[in-house]
Image (cartoon, rainbow, N blue to C red):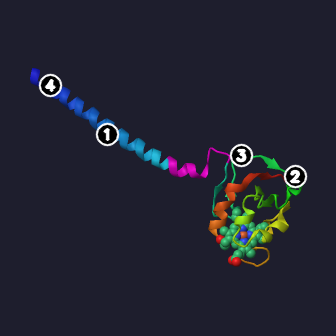
Amino acid sequence: MMKKYVSIALFAFFAIVVAILLGGLFLTKQNLGNSIVSTSTPASSKPVSSPATTPIEVSPGAKTISLALVAKHNTASDCWQAISGNVYDFTPFLNQHPAGAETMIPYCGQDATTAYDTKGGRGDSHSGQAERMLPDYFVGRLSQ
Ligand code: HEM
């Protein structure tokens, strides 16, 4: 009789251990899935790179900035530009630009989408490396 209880208790114990192990495995898988999905919905207000036509994705909480305000930042020492509906402060970047600050300065205070997309009329677009730099200078969304 006693033996029977012991084997039932042992069976129940192992069943619980197996259930815990399987549950753990399931949760780990779910977490991995979430971390992949969460890259497209960041919690911060910083934009992230995406390879679509709009170069970066912006969180809904981002600031909205008018072109009139962008126009006030039109010098090499205070250079804002709008590109594809996003506003950037490129002041600290101008001197790091591979083609030199002078290729970018004429577009300070302006919508520079076409200039950026064509490298100032050359015709070729910027690389993925350039694209990934944009979020570092993001200040807000351009208002319609
Ligand atoms: C006003 C807009 C801009 C113009 C007219 C412009 C123009 C150019 C030109 C002519 C080149 C070619 C250099 C060469 O191959 O000799 C170039 C390269 C480059 N630019 Fe710009 N640029 C602009 C904005 C930007 C911005 C906003 C970034 C990044 C934040 C950037 C990052 C780069 C990088 C990384 C390269 C090296 C080549 C590449 O990766 O595509 N540029 N740019």
Dot 3 or dot 1: first in sequence order is 1
Q: In this figure, which residue is indicated by the disc labeled 1?
A: 21
**Marks 2, 3: nearer the viewer:** 2
Q: How far apart are marks 4 and 1 (CA)?
A: 23 Å
**Ligand 1 located in image quadrant:** bottom right
Give the image location of residue 13, x and y in percent.
23, 30
- Circle 1: residue type: Leu
Q: In this figure, which residue is indicated by the disc labeled 3?
A: 60
Q: Is residue 22 left or right of residue 140?
A: left
**Marks 4, 1: nearer the viewer:** 1
The span shown in magenta is 34-45
Q: Which residue is drawn at 45% across and 45% down?
A: 30
> In this orientation, which residue lies closer to the viewer: 144 or 130?
130
- Circle 3: residue type: Pro
Question: Is label 4 in contact with label 2 (beta carbons under 8 Å)?
Answer: no
> In this orientation, which residue lies closer to the viewer: 22 or 83?
83
